[in-house]
Amino acid sequence: MEKIYTIPFKVRSYEVDRNEKVTFSSICNYFQETAGIHAHHLNFDISQLHKKGLTWVLYKMHIKLLKQPKRWEEVEVTTWPSAGDGLRAFRDYEMKSGTGELLAHAISQWMVLDMKTKRPVRTPKEISEMGIKDKPHTIEPERKSINPLSTDKAELITIVGRNDLDMNHHVNNVRYIDWMTGYPADDHKGCREMEIQYLAESVLGDTIYHTSEIDGNRMVQSLFKNEEKKPIASSISYWD
């Protein structure tokens, strides 16, 4: 079983913005899809963990976009599991053009959750041993937490629907990024880098609130759910 895995993609019309360039969230979808297929090949994807009463939860993801591919452009996404620290499993990603130019790269931090107790458990040995130890991260994992903003100016942006959900019946991880990159200030053209920390799950029917603080091209954002405004995600991003 190959520990380094590559899949080709062709950028489709529904994955691009008004300038016919792939959206930030679509790139995250490529990364997520490649990781899911690779994890299945390695026998530790989400459905395989469910059989053991466990599941994956994404704790953090850090994405850097260097150059946006255009509609119909062919790209390759490569991913590999990297060495974790017992409670967190790391996975790296790269997207390259047909000529080998690096277009985007990322790192994600995952935890294994006991489905009964809803608490993190140590990464099973057979999974942790899959991590590649001698290959450098594409982005060094950040251990510092991203604290949520105040809810004072949070505004309702959406209500969770069925198409927002993943196999855990929770909002898909990339949907949070989609919401955050879909509500920037008018004078910001596009997101080039985001580090997002997931704080709580969201489910069907939840009302989602959003707030942000902007300092030049740097933006801090937080998402909350329902009337109690419980934090569900926070991010630091950089924009054109």
Image (tube, grey):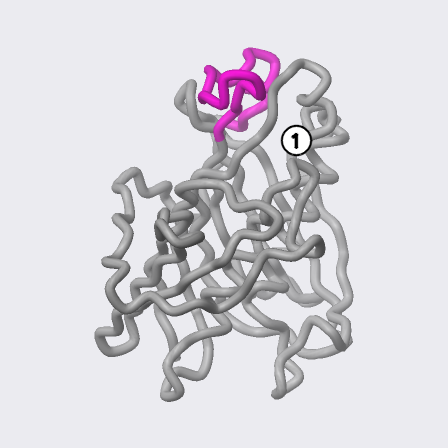
The C terminus is located in which quarter?
bottom left
The N terminus is located in which quarter?
top right
Q: Is residue 227 magenta?
A: no
Residue 202: x percent and y percent? 52, 46
Q: Is residue 64 above or below residue 86?
A: below
Q: Is residue 148 above or below residue 199?
A: below
> Which residue lies at the image location 44% right of the left edge and 41% below the top edge?
200
Q: Which residue is mark 1?
A: 3
Q: How many labels were placed on the picture?
A: 1
From this viewpoint, which residue is outermost toward the front? 227
Q: Is residue 119 magenta?
A: yes
Q: Is residue 166 left or right of residue 198?
A: right
Q: Is residue 29 above or below residue 127?
A: below
Work out whether residue 48 or residue 82 is closer to the camera in this orientation and state it.
48
Work out whether residue 14 or residue 80 is closer to the camera in this orientation and state it.
14
Q: Quadrant of residue 43?
A: top right
Which contiguous range is marked in magenta? 111-132
Q: Quadrant of residue 38?
A: top right
Q: Is residue 59 left or right of residue 70?
A: left
Q: Say what secondary structure mark 1 lies in.
A: loop
Residue 196: x percent and y percent? 41, 52
Q: Quadrant of residue 115?
A: top right
> Which residue lies at the image location 77% right of the left edge and 72% below the top edge?
12
Residue 141: x percent and y percent? 37, 41
Residue 102: x percent and y percent? 55, 62
Work out whether residue 123 or residue 160 is closer to the camera in this orientation and state it.
160
Q: Is residue 152 above or below residue 172?
A: below
Mark 1 Cα-neighbour bin, 10 Å: few <14, some 14–19, many ≥20: some
> Which residue lies at the image location 47% right of the left edge and 16% below the top edge?
121
* Amino acid carrying mark 1 in the image: Lys
> Which residue lies at the image location 50% right of the left edge and 59% below the top edge?
177
